[in-house]
Image: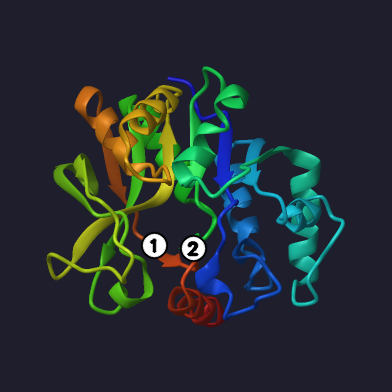
Amino acid sequence: MEKPKYLVIPAAGLGTRMRTVKPELPKELLPLGGKPVIQYAVEEGMDAGISDIVVVIRSGKEIIRDCLQGRWRHPSWSDEAVAGLGAIRKQCCIEYLYQDRPAGVGDAIALAADVVGAHNFAVIYPDNIYLPAPGALATLAAIREKYDCDVTAMTEVDATTAGTISHTGRVDASPVGERLYRIERVLRPGREAFQRRTARELRTWSFAIYGPHLFSYLEQSRAISEDEELGDGDAANLLIRERTLLGYHLPGEVYDVGLPAGYESCRQALRIR
């Protein structure tokens, strides 16, 4: 039951919905609590004992690499955040891969197959922020080790949060333990805000730990998909048919900072803290 060796961070997206916030910055570098958004993802990996990081970018987003390598900083970042980025450079080995066209997040994850090899690995979409941070990925790693199966994070959506997150992460799931669920089906994402089926619906979000078999399911889903962009939902459904995918309802709060409303909500939460 190997602990996750790699953390894969897909950061090649166009981020069109966030251009109204700070058009000069990719969403992964938007300031939150005095530091860039992507720093939260890397620090989650470090907290879980992961020092090998794979960041998938595209041409034109080299500023993300420059940030993590200490060659560029935004005026709003605190000295503490800059020191944290320095610690990342000392403790982590970061490899950058290029997604040469907007082919979807599943395609971005699949690019890491040769780097990850036969190891277990974590995935974090950097536009999802968990508070209090870090700690979410370390919790998932403990569950992965205990049950020896893939696991993804879950959160509750109520009337307040539904308007601040995208219409993704919808699943059918059944409880199997305290805060623990078996994912039975991943539903297709939508393009509008989250539409709840129940008053307090649980959804998955983009912190997860997989075995290397995920890459095979991604390629299988690519072969049968009719979409131009490869998501990760079809691969998850293929995985579910043959293996177990657990969902763990983390007790903290999750913010979708890839949406203006979610970004503002997270900013307010960090001010309170």
Q: Position of residue 137 (x, y in %)?
A: 48, 45
Question: Where does residue 251 sit, x and y in percent of width and height?
Answer: 34, 59
Question: Which residue is most to the top?
Answer: 118
Q: CA distance from mark 1 to mark 2?
A: 6 Å
Residue pointed to by mark 1: 252
- Tell me the quadrant of the picture where the N terminus can be found: top left
Q: Secondary structure at mark 2?
A: loop
**Residue occupying the point 50% across, 82% down:** 268
Q: Is residue 126 left or right of residue 149?
A: right
Disc 1 is placed on an element classified as: loop
Mark 1: which amino acid?
Gly
**Would residue 175 be found to the left or right of residue 38 on screen?**
left
The residue lying toward the viewer, choosing from 249 and 38, is 38
Q: Position of residue 177 (x, y in %)?
A: 18, 41
Residue corresponding to mark 2 = 132
**Tag 2: residue type?**
Pro
26 lies above or below 126: below
Residue extending farthest right: 71
Q: Are marks 1 and 2 in contact (CB under 8 Å)?
A: yes
Is 172 placed above or below 213 here? Answer: below
